[in-house]
Image (spheres, rainbow, N blue to C red):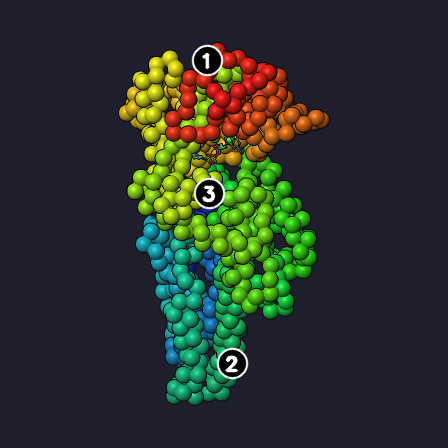
Amino acid sequence: MAGALATTGYFLLPASSLAARVCYNVIGLAAAVAILVGVRLYRPQRPGMWYWFAAGQILSVLGDITYDYYLYGLGRVPYPSTADAFYLAAYPFRIMGLLLLPRLRRRDRAGHLIDAAIAVIGLGMVPWTFILHPSAADPSTAALARVISTVYPVADLLLLGILAWLFTNPRSRTPSNRLLNAAAATLLAADTSYSVLTSYFHADPFVLDGVYVASTLLWAAAALHPSMTADPAVMRDLRPEHSAARLCAPAACSLLGPALLLTPYAGANTVDRTAIACGSIVLILLTIARMALILTSLKSKSRDLERLALHDEMTGLPNRRRFEQALRAALADGPARVAFLGLNGFKNVNDELGRPIGDRVLCSLAQRLARAVPQGALLARIGGDEFAVLLPGESRGHLGTVATHLAAQLREPVHLGGHDVLVGVGIGLAEGDSDQPMELLRRAEAAMYAAKHAGQTYRRWEPAIDEQSAGHAQLGAEMRNGLDAGQFRLVYQPIVAVPEQRVVAVEALVRWDHPQRGMVSPARFVPVAEQNGLIIELGTWILRTACRQMAKWRAELGGRAPDKVSVNVSARQLDRPGFAATVADTLAETGLPPHCLAVEVTETAVFEGGQAVATLHELRGLGVQVALDDFGTGHSSLGLLQTVPVDILKVDKSFVDNITEAGRHSVIAETLIRISAAFGIVAVAEGVETAEQAVALHQLGYRLLQGYHFGRPVTEPDFDRGHTGDAGAGRRAPSASAA
Ligand code: C2E
Ligand code: CA
Ligand code: CA
C-alpha cells in the first residue's frame, strides 16, 4: 500500500525534488517488506534466498539514504562514497542468496564461489579496459572510481548469470523466476548506463532513477507471486558437477586477463597494466585453487566408488568381491579358514511378509553376525541370504565353536513390526592354504549345502562332500529317465491298531527299481529330487498312485480295506501355493473321499511357517488329515503343535528303539503320548521291530503302531490279520509273517 502510494508520488513529483527522493526510498523499503511478506504468505520450502534478497534490498536503501544525505545535507556527492559501500554490500547478499540456495556440499559450494570470483574478475577486466577507458578520467585519481564503476555492471551480470544457471530447467521457468530475471536485467541496464554516464558524460544520474525503481518493483513482484515457492535446488542437484561447460567457463574467464594485456588499449598507462597484471595473477591463483578443489572432489568420488564397489548396499557389509580380495591376501600369508552361512527358509520371509520386512530382517541378522564374529575376522554378504566369515587365525577345534556360536545368534527370533521371524542356518567350514581363494570359498559353500541337507548346524568340507554332490548330479539325471521309463513304484506299510491288530491305515513309500543300481532307497534319491525340483513331478505321481490304490482297495475289499492312506509330502511340495489344489484335483479324479487321505510332513518342512503352514490349513479345509512325521527329532516340537494344524503325531523310531531298556529311555515316548493326548492328537509309534517294543508301547498308552514287526512295506499288504480275532498285542504281538 505504502509502496503503491510512494510509486505514484514518485512519478508525479519533480524528478530531483526531496519529496521524490523520499518516495524513492519508501519504494525501496516497501520492496524489502514485500519480500518478507511473500515469504510469510507462501511459506516456500527454502526461504533462505528471499531473506538474503531482503537484506540486500535493505542495504541498497541504506545506500540511497546515504546518497540523499550527501546530496541534500552536504550539497555534494563524492564518488565513490559510503553510499557505494552500501550499494556494493548489497550484491554479495543477493549473490550469496542464490549460491546458497541449492543443496550443495561445502566443497562444491566453495567451488561455486571461486567460479563466481573468477567470473567477476575476468569479466570485470573487459569493461575496465574498453568501456571505462582511462582517457575519460585522470588515471591516477579516478582508479577507485573506475573499479567501482566496473564492479556494478559485472556484479549485475553475475547475478543474471547465476539466475539463468539456477533456473535452466523448463519446470522452473515460473512467473516468479521470470520477474527475478527481469529485475536483474533491469538492474544491469541501469548500472551500466550509470557507469558510462558518470565516467564519460558527467551527466545527471537522476534520469536513471526510473529504471532503478522498475527493477525494485520487479524484485518485490517476484516475491509476491505465488509461484515463488518453486524450489530451484531440486533442478540444480541433477546437473553433473564437472560438466564441460562448468569447467570451461571459468577457464575462459581466467584467460581474459592475459589476452587483454595484448590489446593496444591496455598499454595506455601503467595503472591499467598493473591492474590487469594483478587481476591476471589473482585469476591464475583462483584457477589453481579451483583445480585443487576439483582434484579433491574427484579423489573423494573415487573413494566413494571404491566403497560402493566393495560393499553391500543394503547391509553395509563387505561384499563378495571384497571377501575374495581379503581371502586372497590371507592365503598369501598362510592357511585361512572360511565359514559359509546359508539361511534357511529366508525366501518364505520375503514371500510372506514382503521384501521391505525381509530386507530389515536381513539387516538385523547381519548386525548380529557382525557383533558375534571373533575379532580380526571379516564378515561379508556373499549373496541374497548367504554370508561368509574369513577367520584368519582360528585353530581347527575353535572353528566348530565359532560356527555353533554364529548359528545360535541367528536362531534367536527377530522381532519386527509385530512379527517374530525365525530363520535357521546351515554353515559350511573349509580351511586350507591353497592358492585358489575361489576353491576355498566353493568348498565352504558345498559343505554348507551338505550341512543343510543333513539337517546339521555345520559341516566341515571333506572330499566325500564333492563326490557326494557329483553323485547327486548323476542320480538326478538318471531319475529324470527313470520317471519317464516308469521305474518308480509304491509300497505300503501297515499301521496297526492294538490290541485288536487291525490294519487301520497304510503309509505309502516310494521305491525306485533302477535297471543297473538295483533298488535305490528313497532316503538317497528323495533328497536329490528335493534339490533338483523333480520331487514336484514325482510327488504328484506318488499322490495320484496312492489315492488310486486306496480307492481300489475300498472298492474291492469293502470293510476290510484300511481307513486311510498316508502319503509323505516334502517341504518343496508344501511350499508351492498350488499344492492343495493338486490334492483336491487328485481326490476328485480318483474318487477318494478326503478323510481317507493323510499327508505326512516333517517338522523341518513346517518349522519356518510361511506357505507350508498355509498349505496345511488349506488341506485341512479339504478334509484331508495332517500327520507330523519323525516327531521329536526336529526343531521345536512342542511349539509347532500350537501353530501347525496337526491330526496325527508320528513318534520317531529313535524313541522306540530302546524303549524296553530300563531307565530313562521310555521317558520321552511316555511324555510324547501324554502330550498328544493333551492336544487331542492321535499318536503313531514308528519303527516297532519287536513284540517287546509293541507291548511296552501299548502299556505306555500307544494304540497305533507301525514297523517291521507288523509288516514291511509291500505292494499288497495283508489286511486280514486283525480279523483273525487275535487281540494279543498286549502279551504276545504276532509278527507279520505269523499273521
Ligand atoms: P519315513 O517317512 O519316516 O518312512 C519310514 C521309513 O522307515 C521307511 O523307510 C520305512 O521302510 C522304514 N521303516 C518302517 N518300519 C521300520 C522298522 O521297523 N525298522 C526300520 N529300521 N525301518 C522301518 P523308507 O521307505 O526307506 O523311507 C525312508 C524315508 O524316505 C521316509 O521316511 C521318507 O522320509 C522318505 N520317503 C519314502 N517314501 C516317500 C515318498 O513317497 N515321498 C516322500 N516325499 N518321501 C518319501
Ligand atoms: Ca513317513
Ligand atoms: Ca517317520
Q: Could you say which quadrant of the image residue 624 lies in? A: top left
Amino acid bearing label 2: Ile
Q: Quadrant of residue 250?
A: bottom left
**Residue at disc 3, secondary structure:** helix
Q: Position of residue 134 (x, y in %)?
A: 43, 82
Q: Which residue is mark 3?
A: 524
The answer to whether the residue bearing label 3 lies less than 8 angstroms from the nearest atom of ligand 1 is no
Q: 532 left or right of 702? A: left
Report, in whole angstroms, how far the alpha carbon at label 3 lies from the one at label 2.
Answer: 84 Å
Residue at (53% x, 54% y) in the render: 464
Q: Quadrant of the N terminus?
A: top left
The numbered mark, 2 or 1, whose residue comes first in the sequence reads 2
Q: Secondary structure at mark 2?
A: helix
Q: Which residue is mark 1?
A: 724
- The 10 Å Cα crowd at callout 1, few under 14, some 14 to 19, many 20 or more, is few
- In the picture of the structure, the residue carrying the numbered disc 2 is 281
Residue 121: image x %, image y %? 47, 74
Q: Residue furthest front?
A: 738
